[in-house]
Amino acid sequence: MILVRILYILPVNWGGIPHYTAELANAMANYAEVVVLKPKGSNDQLFSNHVKVINVFEPLSLTKGHEKNAISISNLKNFLSYSKVNVADSIKPDIIHFPGTYVHAAFFSSLYRLNKNFPIVQTKHSVADPYLQSTSSKGFFRTLLWNLNDSAKYLPQPDAYIVHTKENRQSLINEGISSDKISIVPHGSYTFFKKYQKSSSDCDNSKNILLYFGYIDRHKGVDQLINAIPIVAKEVPDVKVIIAGEGSLSECCSKIDNESYFEIINEFVPDERVSDLFTRAKIIVLPYTYHQGLSGVLSIAFAFGKPVIVTDVGNLAEFADGCGLVVPPNDSNSLANSIIHLINNNELREKLSKASEMKGKELSWDNIARKHLKIYGEAVSRYLDK
């Protein structure tokens, strides 16, 4: 099945979805004409000159951690701008792919019955996340905003689903979705961050720098990492921990006894600075107490060939296999011992670094794009057989 034109509908301008969409679209442009519908005013620089970008939506204010700001007149107007999703009719794609679907895009896609006019593919980065289900108003509101992409009832019925893990595939099957419509495609390696890398000499392996990167939430285990550092410092006095990302650090910071061991960057980290952080780091630490799906942080670590330490939650151990060490969640002592072991064992660290680099090459976006091409062809055939 030869595809001429692929349309990606990017529903948000925050988080990792724009990066994911851009990497996939840029790679897919080597095989077909690619068009992206996206919110105005951001992320254009992520897309190559071979991708046609149409800034058609007004950006919504649905920032994680500031969910109450979502209720406003301006946000309602911006929500209505997603009615312009019907420009798909004039683009006439062979297939439409939602690389991350939220209710504002899904509502109008259903209203205009895009699934009746075009084959639809949907990527679900997580499925029915039970951890975030809460009876509290804050928990319910956050769940509503951040997990609507897990609610198939809001979507045009796709002709194919893409997930990243066996666990998520089984969750969709349990929801009654036919197994032949669900494909597992791993998350590609975020190599584009490396274009900001100034020099390989920026990585000074004599410095024992640990990096926690990403949104700071109660299930990310930052407190466990902070608790582990006094133990590490007894064996590695020059250890340094960089904690970089948005979110609330108020509870965690109260546990810091010696601030000299920490560098805190509690804000959104721009792309060019991400490269600097991962280049400086000797080890990437994901001390999560809960996780579902694949971590974009691991994808960046693989791109930079960094060894990782992850907790045995979700599929982290599976994805980090051969590239790092695995510790139990909520166990700062085990975390500390693994950090000490990896810092002091140069041979092991070098072995894991090489494996991480190879994993990054294996997860190249060209490889990911070719997997998508096969799925797109199957989705088109399924659509034509309706």
Image: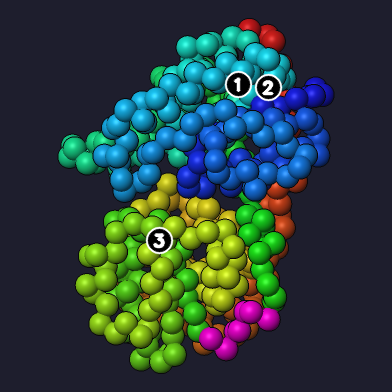
- 382 or 59: nearer the viewer: 59
- 180 or 362: nearer the viewer: 362
Amino acid, disc 1: Ile
Q: Quadrant of the N terminus?
A: top right
Q: Mark 3 points at which residue?
A: 267
Can residue 164 be found in the magenta stretch? no
Do labels 1 and 3 touch, CB within 8 Å? no
- Image point (55%, 55%), residue name: 319
- Image point (69%, 10%), residue name: 384
Which mark identifies residue 95?
Answer: 2
- 166 or 106: nearer the viewer: 106
Query: Over which residues does the magenta segment extend?
Result: 201-207
In this rendering, which labeled residue sits more in front, label 3 or label 2? 3
Residue 102, image x, y percentages: 44, 30
On screen, residue 305 above or below 107:
below
Can residue 205 be found in the magenta stretch? yes
Q: Quadrant of residue 362?
A: bottom right
Which mark identifies residue 120?
Answer: 1
